[in-house]
Amino acid sequence: MSLGNRRNGREYALKVLYSLYDQDRPIQEVLADFWRNFRFNDDVLGEPEEMQDSEVLPEVKEFAEQIVLGVYEHLEDIDAVLRETSKNWSLDRMARLDLSLMRLACYELMYMPSTPDRVVINEAIEIAKRYGTKDTSAFLNGVLDKIAQQVKARRQEEA
C-alpha cells in the first residue's frame, strides 16, 4: 500500500476515533455510519475527499478500520502508556484531536511493528499539522518519541 493510501487511512481512522467521544454505540455501527456519511461538508475535521463521488479504496478502508478496531480493542493499554508517558498531562486535559491522534499513533507503535517508528511519528506529525493547533506537532513528537523508545526496549527484552 502506498504512503498516500496509508496517510488517507490514518486520516479516516482519526476522524472515526475523534467521533467516538460522542458515541455510545457498538464500534461496528459507528464504522458503518462513518463510511455511509463521511463525505458530509460539515465534517468537524475537514472534507476527506475533493470529489463527492469518489470511492475510498478498499485497502484504505481496511487500513483505517484496522487502526480503529485496534485502538478500540487495546484502549486500556494504550491509555495506560499515554498516562505513564505524559505525566504532566491527564488524558482529560488533552485536546480531543491530540488524544485521538496519539491513540492512533500509539496503537501503531505498540501493535504494528512492521511500520517503522519514524514513519508512525512523522505521519502523526504531518496529520497534526493539517488538523491540530500550532503546538500539536511538538507535543505529539515528544510523547510519541518516548513511547517508541519504551516499546523498542520492551521488544528487546522479550527477544
Image: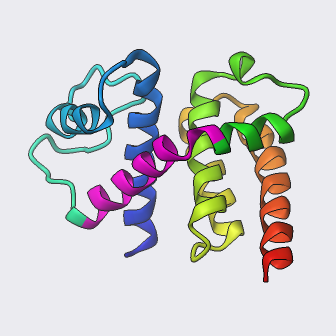
Q: Is residue 61 left or right of residue 125?
A: left
Of residues 55 and 81, the one nearer the viewer is 81
Of residues 134 and 2, the one nearer the viewer is 2
The residue sitting at the front extreme is 158
Residue 75 on image: x %, y %: 57, 40
- Quarter of image, res 112: bottom right
Determine if the magenta segment contains residue 39. Answer: no
Q: Quadrant of the N terminus?
A: bottom left
- Which residue appears at 84% of the width and 60% of the height? 150
Q: Quadrant of the C terminus?
A: bottom right
Q: Is residue 76 left or right of residue 142?
A: left
Residue 2 on image: x %, y %: 40, 74
Of residues 76 and 121, the one nearer the viewer is 76
- Which residue appears at 14% of the width and 51% of the height? 54
The residue sitting at the right extreme is 88
Count of marks placed on residues: 0
Res 27 visible: yes
- Quarter of image, res 46: top left
- Which residue appears at 54% of the width and 34% of the height? 131
Residue 20 on image: x %, y %: 42, 26
- Quarter of image, res 133: top right
Against 149, is 127 above or below? above
Against 98, is 56 above or below? below
Of residues 83 and 2, the one nearer the viewer is 83
Determine if the magenta segment contains residue 69. Answer: yes
Residue range in magenta is 59-76
Res 102 visible: no
Residue 135 on image: x %, y %: 76, 31
